[in-house]
C-alpha cells in the first residue's frame, strides 16, 4: 500500500510539473505575438469578430437547413394546386374551388403600366437587391415601431414569391427566417424577370383567382394584356390583402387602395401626376358578381372530399385539374337556403335563435343539399360539418336500436320512474313520471328516464357496459365523433355534427345497412376522361343493424311524427319517421327525420351557445324540415318506408310558416325522371365510356359537349371498329328501348 501511495503521489507531482512547463513554453511562444497600443484593439476586434462570425455562420446554417429542405422536390417550379370544377347531379356547372390560374402570358406582353404599378407598390428596388431589401426592411421596422403595430411590410417581391411557393401565411419568426433564405435561393437559380413572372402568375388575388391574368378575367372580364391604368392599379392593390380589397366584395376599399397605388407610381418616379390623373378621375369598376349565388357551404365540403379522394388515386396520376359531378340538387338547395332564412327572419328574434344548419341526403348517402349557416358571406364556418353540438333526444334512436338488438320489442313494457346513477338523476321534459308504458310510447313521448334505464338493461345491469354497447351501435351506423362515457350519454349529452348524424339515420330506411355521406358521384380529368365514380369505386354499404331492428325503429320513429313531438313535420301522402332533440337550457334544437327517399336533419341555435327562448326540436326545426321535404318529394317516384302505411290525411301544417295569414304558395318542383329512366341513362353513359375506350382514333380528337373525346378519323382497324360498332349498336338499342 505504501508503494502504491508513493506511485500515485509521484505521478501527480510529475503531471503537475509537466503541465506547468507546458504552460510556460506556450506563454513564451505567445509572447512573440504580443501587441500594444492601438494595434491591440484591432486584434481584439478581429478576434471577437471571427468568433462571433463562426458562431453566426453555424447558427445561419442551422436555420437554413429547414428552409432548403422545402426545395428538395425537383418539380417545385411546375407544382400547382388542385383545381376542381363542380357540376350538379344533372351536369350543370355550379362552382369551382382551388386555383383559378393562367400563366400563359409572357412577361413582355403584360402592359408596362401594370408592371410599374406592381413594382412601385410591392418592391421598388426589385432589380437592385439580392433577394432581401435591407433598406426597405429597416424602413418598415422603424415605421411599424413608430406606429405601434404592423402598418408596412418589409418583404421583398422575392420573399413574397418564396412564401407563395413554399410557405404558409402564418405570422411567425420561423416563417420569416425561412422566407429570407428561400428568397436568396430563388435569386441564385432564377433571373429577375423569371421571378417577377412567377410572382405575377402565382400570387393569390382574391375570388379564387391566382395570378394577375386570372384576376383580370374574374374582376374585369378581360385579359391582363388589355387592362387600363385604373384597372392595373386596382389589381396591384390586391397583393397586400386580396380579401379586404377585392372589388366584388368592397368596391370603395378597392378604389381607395388603387388610389394609393397611383400615389406610389408618382412617388417612385415611374409616372407623373399628369399621367395618372385620368385613372384617378375614372376609377375601375369590377364585374358585378353579387347575383352569382353558389352553394358555397356544399362546395367547400365537396372540395375537402375531393382533396382526400385525389390522395387515393395512383401515384402515376399527376393531373391537378378535375371536373367533379356531385349529388347536389340545386332545387332542393335553393329551397333549403330560403327555408332557413325565412324561418329565422320570421321567428328568430322571438325564439332568440340566430343560426341554423341542415343536410338533405338520399338514403344511399348522396348529399342533395347542405346549409352550413345563415349567411356564407358573413361566416364561412360550416356548421353542418364542423360544429359539434349536443343532439339531445335525437340521440335516443341509437339507444333504442341497441335495446331492440338485445331482445326488446316495440311492445315491451318499461317503467317511467325516478332513477339515479351516482349523484346524477335525470328528469323528464314535463317534470313528472308516467309509470308503465310500451317502448313505442316511451320513444314517442321522449322519456329521459327510460333511455337511461335501457342503457342499464342492455349492459345486463352494468351501466358502463350498456353505454359502451350504445356507442358501438352509433359507431357502426356512422357516428365518428368522440363519445365520452358519461351517465348522460343515453339522452344526448355528447356532441356530434349534423352530417354524421344524418348519415347514421340513413341506416334505418336502409333496413340496417350503413352508408357513407358523400358529395362526389364521379370525377373526370380536365379533358373529360372518367377516372373515378362512386358506384364503382366508392365504399359499399355495410350491415350495421339487423333488418328486423331497423324495421322496428322505423315503426317507433314514425309514431313520433304521427302522434308525438314531431307532428309539425308530417307530410301529405308520404310516410315519415324521425326524432326531435332539445338540449339543456334550450341551447340546441334538432329534428332528424327520413322517408323512403330522403334523410334530412335540421338544427337551430346560437353560435355562442346562449340559450334560446324555450325552442324545441318540434318547433322551428320540424317546420323547416317539413318545408324542405315537401318540395323534395314533388315530381319523383316515391318509395315508402318498410312496414309503414301511407298517410291519407290532408296536409295539416303550413308550408312556409305556421301563421294562418301566410298565403305564400308552396314551391313547386319540376317532374323528374323516374328511377327506371335514371338507371337507363346511367347504363347509356357507361356504354359511351366503354365505346370511347374501345375505339382507337387515327386522327386527332376533339372534346364533345359532354367532355368526352369524339373520333374524327372514321373507321379504325377492323377488330377495333367491330368492337366499337357493337357497342354503338347496343347503345342505340338501349336508347330505343328506353324511349317510352
Image (cartoon, rainbow, N blue to C red):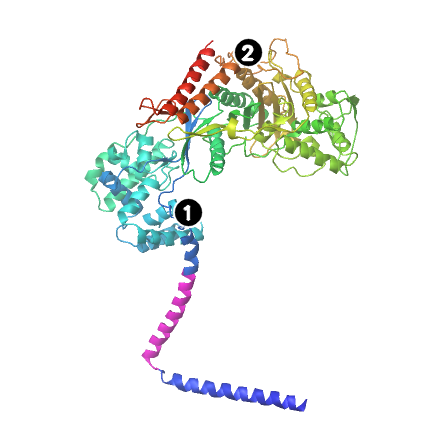
Q: Secondary structure at mark 1?
A: loop
Residue 514 quadrant: top right
How many C-alpha atoms fall within 10 Å of the one at disc 1: few (<14), some, or many (≥20)?
some
Residue 399 shown left or right of residue 502 in the figure:
right
Number of numbered discs overlaid on the protein picture: 2
Q: Which residues are magenta?
A: 35-60
Residue 52 lies within the magenta run? yes
Q: Main secondary structure of the magenta part?
A: helix
Name the residue that disc number 1 marks: 167
Name the residue that disc number 2 marks: 661
Q: Position of residue 719 (x, y in %)?
A: 39, 24
Chain-order first, disc 1 or disc 2: 1
Distance from Cα at disc 1 to Cα at disc 2: 58 Å
Instruction: Report the front residue among 141 and 319.
Output: 319
Instruction: Report the front residue among 404 and 601.
Output: 404
Question: Which image quadrant: the N terminus?
Answer: bottom right
Q: Position of residue 546 (x, y in %)?
A: 68, 26
Residue at horizontal 35 percent and vertical 76 percent from the top: 43
Residue 455 quadrant: top right
Instruction: Report the front residue among 21 and 206.
Output: 21
Residue 564 lies within the magenta run? no
Q: Secondary structure at mark 2?
A: loop
Q: Position of residue 83 (x, y in %)?
A: 40, 34
Residue 515 shown left or right of residue 176 in the figure:
right
Residue located farthest toward the front when viewing the structure as drawn: 718
Q: Position of residue 99 (x, y in %)?
A: 39, 36
Residue at horizontal 50 percent and vertical 85 percent from the top: 19
Kindly identify which numbered label has been placed on residue 35: none
| Relative vertical location of residue 684 with respect to residue 531 in this rendering, above or below | above
Instruction: Report the front residue among 29 and 539.
Output: 539
Amino acid at each position: 500500500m505504501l508503494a502504491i501511495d508513493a506511485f500515485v503521489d509521484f505521478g501527480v507531482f510529475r503531471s503537475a510539473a509537466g503541465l506547468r512547463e507546458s504552460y510556460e513554453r506556450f506563454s513564451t511562444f505567445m509572447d512573440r505575438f504580443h501587441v500594444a497600443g492601438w494595434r491591440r484593439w484591432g486584434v481584439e476586434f478581429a478576434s471577437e469578430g471571427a468568433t462571433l462570425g463562426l458562431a453566426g455562420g453555424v447558427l445561419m446554417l442551422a436555420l437554413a437547413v429547414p428552409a432548403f429542405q422545402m426545395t428538395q422536390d425537383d418539380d417545385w417550379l411546375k407544382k400547382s394546386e388542385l383545381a376542381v370544377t363542380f357540376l350538379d347531379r344533372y351536369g350543370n356547372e355550379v362552382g369551382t374551388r382551388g386555383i383559378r390560374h393562367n400563366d400563359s402570358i409572357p412577361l413582355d406582353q403584360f402592359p408596362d403600366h401594370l408592371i410599374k404599378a406592381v413594382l412601385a407598390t410591392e418592391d421598388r428596388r426589385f432589380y437592385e437587391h439580392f433577394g432581401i431589401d435591407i433598406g426597405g426592411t429597416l424602413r418598415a421596422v422603424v415605421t411599424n415601431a413608430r406606429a405601434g403595430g404592423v402598418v408596412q411590410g418589409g418583404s421583398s417581391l422575392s420573399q413574397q414569391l418564396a412564401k407563395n411557393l413554399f410557405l404558409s401565411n402564418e405570422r411567425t419568426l420561423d416563417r420569416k427566417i425561412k422566407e429570407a433564405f428561400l428568397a436568396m435561393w430563388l435569386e441564385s437559380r432564377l433571373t429577375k424577370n423569371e421571378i417577377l413572372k412567377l410572382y405575377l402568375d402565382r400570387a393569390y388575388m382574391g375570388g379564387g383567382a391566382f395570378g394577375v391574368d386570372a384576376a383580370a378575367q374574374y374582376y374585369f372580364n378581360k385579359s391582363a394584356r388589355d387592362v387600363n391604368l385604373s384597372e392595373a392599379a386596382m389589381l396591384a392593390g390586391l397583393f397586400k390583402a386580396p380579401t379586404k380589397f377585392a372589388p366584388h366584395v368592397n368596391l370603395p376599399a378597392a378604389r381607395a387602395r388603387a388610389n394609393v397605388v397611383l400615389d406610389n407610381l408618382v412617388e417612385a418616379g415611374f409616372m407623373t401626376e399628369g399621367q395618372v390623373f385620368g385613372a384617378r378621375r375614372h376609377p375601375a369598376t369590377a364585374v358585378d358578381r353579387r347575383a352569382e349565388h353558389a352553394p358555397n357551404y356544399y362546395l367547400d365540403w365537396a372540395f375537402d372530399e375531393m382533396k382526400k379522394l385525389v390522395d387515393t388515386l395512383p401515384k402515376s396520376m399527376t393531373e391537378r385539374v378535375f371536373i367533379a359531378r356531385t349529388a347536389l340538387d340545386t332545387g332542393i338547395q335553393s329551397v333549403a337556403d330560403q327555408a332557413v332564412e325565412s324561418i329565422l327572419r320570421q321567428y328568430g328574434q322571438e325564439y332568440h335563435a340566430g343560426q341554423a344548419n341542415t343536410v338533405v341526403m338520399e338514403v344511399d348517402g348522396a348529399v342533395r343539399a347542405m346549409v352550413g349557416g345563415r349567411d356564407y358571406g358573413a361566416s364561412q364556418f360550416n356548421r353542418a360539418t364542423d360544429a359539434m353540438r349536443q343532439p339531445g333526444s335525437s340521440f335516443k334512436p341509437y339507444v333504442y336500436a341497441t335495446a331492440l338488438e338485445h331482445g326488446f320489442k316495440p311492445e315491451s313494457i318499461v317503467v317511467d320512474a325516478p332513477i339515479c346513477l351516482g349523484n346524477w338523476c335525470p328528469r323528464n321534459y314535463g317534470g313528472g313520471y308516467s309509470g308503465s308504458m310500451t317502448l313505442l310510447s316511451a320513444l314517442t313521448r321522449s322519456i329521459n328516464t327510460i333511455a337511461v334505464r335501457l342503457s342499464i338493461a342492455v349492459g345486463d345491469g352494468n351501466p358502463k357496459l350498456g353505454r359502451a354497447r350504445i356507442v358501438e351501435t352509433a359507431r357502426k351506423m356512422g357516428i365518428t365523433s368522440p363519445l365520452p362515457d358519461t351517465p348522460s350519454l343515453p339522452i344526448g349529452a355528447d356532441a356530434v355534427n349534423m352530417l354524421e348524424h344524418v348519415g347514421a339515420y340513413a341506416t334505418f330506411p336502409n333496413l340496417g345497412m350503413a352508408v357513407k355521406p358523400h358529395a362526389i358521384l364521379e370525377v373526370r380529368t380536365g379533358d373529360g376522361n372518367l377516372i373515378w365514380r362512386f358506384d364503382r369505386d366508392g365504399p359499399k354499404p355495410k350491415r350495421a343493424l339487423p333488418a328486423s331492428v331497423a324495421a322496428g325503429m322505423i315503426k317507433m320513429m314514425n309514431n313520433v311524427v304521427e302522434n308525438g313531438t314531431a307532428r309539425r313535420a308530417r307530410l301529405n301522402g308520404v310516410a315519415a319517421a324521425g326524432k326531435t332533440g332539445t338540449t339543456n337550457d334550450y341551447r340546441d334544437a334538432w329534428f332528424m327525420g327520413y322517408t323512403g327517399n330522403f334523410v334530412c336533419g335540421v338544427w337551430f341555435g346560437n353560435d355562442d351557445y346562449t340559450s334560446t327562448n324555450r325552442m324545441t326540436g318540434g318547433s322551428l326545426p320540424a317546420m323547416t324540415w317539413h318545408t324542405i321535404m315537401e318540395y323534395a318529394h314533388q315530381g319523383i317516384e316515391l318509395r315508402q318506408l318498410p312496414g309503414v302505411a301511407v298517410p291519407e290525411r290532408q296536409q295539416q301544417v303550413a308550408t312556409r310558416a305556421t301563421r294562418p295569414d301566410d298565403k305564400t304558395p308552396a314551391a313547386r318542383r319540376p317532374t323528374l325522371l323516374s328511377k327506371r329512366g335514371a338507371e337507363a341513362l346511367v347504363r347509356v353513359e357507361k356504354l359511351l365510356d366503354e365505346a370511347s375506350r374501345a375505339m382507337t382514333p387515327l386522327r386527332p380528337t376533339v372534346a364533345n359537349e359532354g367532355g368526352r373525346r369524339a373520333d374524327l378519323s372514321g373507321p379504325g382497324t377492323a377488330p377495333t371498329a367491330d368492337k366499337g360498332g357493337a357497342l354503338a349498336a347496343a347503345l342505340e338499342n338501349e336508347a330505343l328501348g328506353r324511349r317510352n
